[in-house]
Image: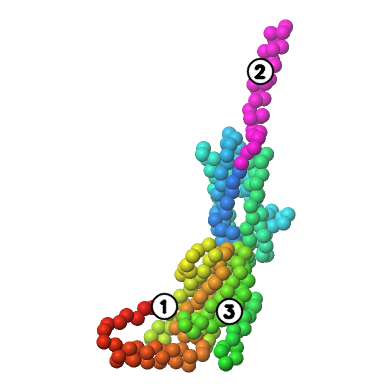
Amino acid sequence: MNKIFFLLALIVSISFSPAFAQEVAGQKITVTTDNSAYQQGDIITVSGNIEKILPGTPVIMQIFFERTQVDVAQLDVSKNGKFSTTFVADGPLWSSDGLATLRVAYGSDVTETSFDFFEKTQMDRFISNYEVTIPDAGTFDIPYTIKGGTIESISLNQKSLGIDIDLITQSDGYIQLKLYRDYIDSLKGDGSDEVFIIVVKNSQNEYPVQTEFRKIETTDEFRSIEVPLKNGDSHMQIIGTFAIPEFATVAQFVLIIAIISIIAITAKTKFRINNF
């Protein structure tokens, strides 16, 4: 009788062991997104890693705005514990700016991360104006929209024939600027449009780096552009071929030519002019 009872108990314990194996103490789940902020229509790439694989258990991903679920996905975990997928930040539930929460569940364990979401701004709608001072000649406005940070100041830079923008950024994002041609422009010798050179300084980098920009709209009166921002960006320089007041630019060239002429007349040896 005892042998039969022992055999039944052994069979029961074996039959239930797979269920208990699904519970893993101290499970570690890591998850990251490829950016910390996204605009409407962007592709969100999510990747992560599971420390201890549970056979047959999928990863469940959910994206929430507050308590509203805006997207969900279920995916398998590879043999080495890795997983990845993409979401598109678009649809009726992606309807307002805000902080989104990405929740990842695996078995009974859950981890979360977050990112900023920005609605796509209409190209003819700018949220704010910044009043830029023209030395001894009044002011002019630069309409702008910024997401992921704030503007501290915008000033003319006659040396670079452009403008300097001081920023405070809290996440990845973008800045849209409406640049009126009467005040700043970039033109080729034949009068056609030349691209602006845009240089950005980030707190994580020792030196500023050149960045790309997107053309939004171009007319005879203005050029609207969008420049991506990264968390930590603190200074942006937009360089063109003209910046008001024009007479100050001409005066600089006249002064440079005068100095070079004096040196050329008086110098008895070769000289080099360093760019700066």
Instruction: Please provide the residue range marked out in magenta.
Output: 1-28
Q: Position of residue 4 (x, y in %)?
A: 69, 9
Camera-nearest residue between 53 and 88:
53
Can you tell which mark lies on residue 276?
1
Q: Nearer the viewer, mark 3 or mark 1?
A: 1
Question: Residue 1's quadrant in the figure?
Answer: top right
Q: Position of residue 83 (x, y in %)?
A: 55, 45
Q: Residue at the location (63% across, 45% down)?
A: 60
In the image, taking residue 27 as reference, residue 256 lies left or right, namely left
Q: Kindly report the distance in space between the C-alpha atoms of the residues bearing marks 2 and 3.
A: 77 Å
Q: Amino acid at mark 1?
A: Phe
> Which is the main secondary structure of the residues drawn in magenta?
helix
In the image, taking residue 116 as reference, residue 82 lies left or right, namely left
Name the residue that disc number 3 marks.
154
Name the residue that disc number 2 marks.
11
Asked if the residue under mark 1 is in contact with the one under mark 2, i.e. CB atoms within 8 Å, the reply is no
In the image, is residue 36 above or below residue 79? Answer: below
Q: Residue at the location (65% across, 76% down)?
A: 127
Q: Label 3, secondary structure: give it.
A: strand
Q: Position of residue 271 (x, y in %)?
A: 30, 82
Q: Amino acid at mark 2?
A: Ile
Residue 9: say if magenta: yes
The quarter of the image holding the C terminus is bottom left
Query: Looking at the image, what colour scheme do you see?
Result: rainbow
